[in-house]
Each structure stands twice: as structure tokens, then as C-alpha cells.
Image: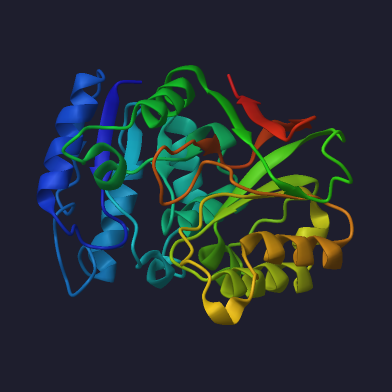
Amino acid sequence: MNQLVFFSPSGALIDEALLDRASLQLQSLGFATAEMPETRLRVQRFAGDETTRCSSIEHAFKTQTPALLMATRGGYGLSRLLPTLNFPELARCLNEHGHLLSGHSDITSLQLALLNAGAKPATLLHGPMACFDFGPQEGVDAQTKEHFLRAVQHGQVDVQWHAPCAGLQSATEKLHVSGPVWGGNLTLLCSLIGTPWLPTVPGGILVLEDVNEPAYKIERMLLQLLHAGVLAQQQAIVLGNFCEPKPGNHDNGYTLHSAAQFVHQQLGRAPVILEFPFGHCTPKACWFQGGQGQLSIEAGQAARLTQILR
């Protein structure tokens, strides 16, 4: 797959030079890049009005030859489009044309709605976007590029990291689970509770990230997922990068690790694993939305998440 199509389903571009550099960077990796005509539009904070952005998504998905469909950026905007988009038809286009949709953040709601509508996991890469990951002047991060190319070219994910964990009794205890890997942005996932677009994923490995949220707000959203019955269905909860503000004096030692420990105590079964290298961060791993994966933690908290989709 060497055809790459940029589209902007959410927020307007903040700096068009980022997309210009991203296009050159991806061309240097062997991709032939193109843009949907609406990619650089702006209406208020959005990349075009709702009708325009819906049409851009539909036209991108109808590209006749297999293509990597990469969101330029996230931001906010897809929540406005969910009632209008024909997700069964969009999922059919992804499956039949062999496209691969890449993005994260606000793209979470688009991917989860597509997964719920029958899109194959091999078409949904929860990973880089153009401007943030490929647009910096210094170029794409080496590890981000390695994860991205392994997934796009080989359909494989292999992420290793040091993982503090709430739920293992000692540093020598091991964990090995298999199940569908899914999730994304925590705020977006919570926003889909009670809607027709949230898939049910029993036995899953739920990966979550967010940006600039203090630990107590992260805990509150995790508890919302717990109270809605989502967490009870999972084999493991994996927390990525949250870019959370530093704890203040009022927190008195309360951190994201404290929140993870409390959520695990309420859940009582699935471990909560931290510091997965994914989110609004660099370097950035990636994974296939809904694809079968294996998660292991060895003695010393050495963690590994793998997927092989083709």
C-alpha cells in the first residue's frame, strides 16, 4: 500500500506548514500523497461545516484503490457528524477497498463506530496523524516511524515498555492475556456510552489515553466506564500517556498511579497497567482497533503488546 490520502474530519489545520512537511516526510517513506479538496478548509474551529466534512469522509472512503487514509489532526468535530454518517456503508468501503484508516484522539469515535458497524480490524490503525507526528521540523520520531511502518507494511504490532501495574501481587508475578485490543481517547470513549456507536468488546484489552486532564478527572472517567459495565468485560486496562498536569499541593500525594490503584480495587479483577507509550506524545506506538492481541508482563514489569493481522 503506497497511496496515502489526507483528510480533515475534525478540527481545522492550525499550521498548514505542518501538513506540507508531513506530506514530504511520508513521500520520503515511499507514499504517494494526495489531499481531499476540503482538507485545508476552516469554518470557525472546524475543517469545514458538517456537510462538507461528512462528504470529505465519504469521498475519501470511496477511493477505488487501496489507500492509507490519514487524518491530518484531531481536535473536536466528529461528535457532530456521528448521527449523519452511514457507518455500515463506510465500513463496507473500508473492507472492500482494503483501505487503512490511521488516526487517534478525536478519530477514536470514528473508528469505534466503524468497528461497531463491521469494519475489519485490519482497516483501523489507531496511530499517527499527519501534522503532529510527521509535521515537526525535526522530522518523525524514529520509534514512531518504526511502529507505524511495521503496522502498515506488515500488519504487525510489537510494543515493549516498562509497565507499573495495579493488580499484580508482586514484582515477580506474571500476566499473559489474549483478546481484542481496542479503545483510544478516554473522553471520546466516555462520550459514546449510551449511544448506538459504542461497540461491545468482551474479553478485551482496553487501551486508553487523554491529554491535559488531571488525575482526578481521569479517575472519574474510568469510574464512569466501570459503572457503565465496560471495564468489567475487560481482561486488562492499559493506560497510555495522559500529559496530566503535575500534582498540586492539594493532591497530597494523589497521582495517576493512585487513581489506577483505586479503580483496580473497585474492579477487583482486571489489572490496570500504566505508561503504555501511546497518546498525545512522542514516541508513539500504534495498534489495530479491535484486532486480536497478546499482552504479557514478565517479572520486573517488562510488558509487551503484540498483534499479527496478516
Residue, x 61% and y 67% (percent of image)? 196
What is the basis of the colouring in this image? rainbow
Question: Which quadrant holds residue 130?
Answer: top left
* Along the line of sight, the residue nearer the viewer: 255 or 141: 255
Tell me the quarter of the image containing the C terminus: top right
Position of residue 139 in the picture relative to residue 286 (left or right): left
Q: Where is residue 229 shown, x and y percent of the image?
A: 79, 67
Residue, x 15% and y 29% (percent of image)? 24
Q: Where is residue 239 shown, x and y percent of the image?
A: 62, 52
Question: Which quadrant holds residue 55?
Answer: bottom left
Position of residue 141 in the picture relative to residue 217 (left or right): left
Determine if residue 171 is in view.
Answer: yes
* Along the line of sight, the residue nearer the viewer: 99 or 179: 179
Position of residue 200 in the picture relative to residue 79 (left or right): right
* Along the line of sight, the residue nearer the viewer: 198 or 231: 231
How many dots with numbers? 0
Q: Where is residue 243 shown, x and y percent of the image?
A: 45, 58
Tell me the quarter of the image containing the N terminus: top left
Q: Is residue 184 above or below residue 253?
A: above
Q: Residue furthest bottom?
A: 250
Residue, x 60% and y 45% (percent of image)? 118
Determine if residue 32 is in view.
Answer: no
Residue, x 15% and y 66% (percent of image)? 42
Question: Which quadrant holds residue 193?
Answer: bottom right
